[in-house]
């Protein structure tokens, strides 16, 4: 069994992971509308990854003999001024998620729930990768600037992205 406060926090995080997927799909929609299919693919794959994270928390809650509770999701931002802005918003979202996992880890440590501490460490490691990935894409996009040829090539590279839970 999970401590009530920890269970509530895990459920909240599970829902936030599904919200993150929702937000990335909104970014994909913006990219598709702007005919940036490669960038749209990047965000569609990112959304798959966030849903996987939500499912992972869902499974953990159930494995601990508790009930996963779903709540409504806020509407994500749907209007962007540029591809760069989508990545900057993505980075801000990932930094928020990192802070949420820090807070969850604080609760698990306070409750001395070692199984949950171990479980959350995977997410903490994942967040380092997520933030780094978005920072790198932002650096590349700033470097590319208004070079449409470089942007075209970069987009084609991102069109190859494919999420795999085994990776």
Image (tube, rainbow, N blue to C red):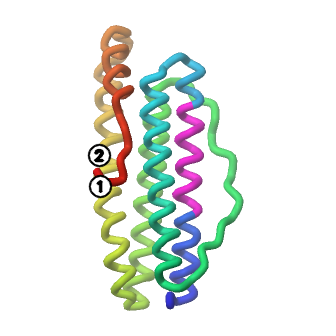
Residue under circle 1?
Answer: 128
Label 1 environment density (alpha carbons within 10 Å; few <14, some 14–19, many ≥20): few
Indicate which disc residue 117 carries. Answer: none
- Numbered disc total: 2
Q: Is residue 137 left or right of residue 80?
A: left
Disc 1 on helix, strand or loop?
helix
- Left or right: 145 as drawn, with respect to 93: left
Camera-nearest residue between 70 and 82: 70
From this view, report whether residue 34 is shown above or below residue 14: above
Tell which of 97 and 160 is nearer to you: 160
Specify the segment rendered in magenta: 15-28
On whether residue 22 falls in the magenta region, the answer is: yes
Image position of 41 with respect to 132: above or below: above
**Residue visible at 45% across and 31% down in the picture:** 41
* In the image: residue 28, left or right of residue 70: left
Kindly identify the residue that appears in the image at 37 percent across and 21 percent down.
Answer: 155
Q: Residues within 10 Å of mark 2 (few under 14, many from 20)?
A: some
Mark 2 and mark 1 residues within 8 Å of each other at the beta carbon: yes
Measuring from the top left, give residue 158's x and y in whole percent.
35, 28
The part of the image, by quadrant, that contains residue 134 is: top left
Secondary structure category for the residue under label 2: helix
What is the CA distance from the residue labelled 2 to the residue labelled 1?
6 Å
Q: Which mark is residue 132?
A: 2
């Amino acid at each position: 069994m999970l401590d009530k406060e920890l269970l509530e926090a895990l459920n909240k995080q599970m829902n936030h992971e599904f919200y993150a997927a929702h937000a990335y799909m909104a970014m994909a929609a913006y990219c598709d509308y702007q005919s940036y299919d490669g960038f749209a693919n990047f965000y569609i794959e990112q959304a798959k990854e966030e849903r996987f994270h939500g499912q992972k928390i869902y499974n953990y809650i159930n494995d601990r003999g508790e009930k996963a509770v779903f709540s409504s999701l806020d509407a994500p931002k749907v209007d962007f001024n540029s591809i760069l802005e989508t990545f900057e918003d993505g980075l801000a979202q990932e930094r928020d998620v990192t802070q949420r996992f820090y807070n969850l880890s604080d609760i698990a440590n306070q409750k001395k729930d070692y199984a949950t501490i171990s479980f959350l460490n995977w997410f903490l490691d994942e967040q380092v990768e997520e933030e780094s990935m978005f920072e790198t894409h932002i650096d590349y996009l700033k470097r590319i600037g208004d070079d449409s040829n470089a942007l075209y090539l970069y987009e084609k590279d991102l069109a190859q992205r494919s999420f795999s839970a085994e990776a």
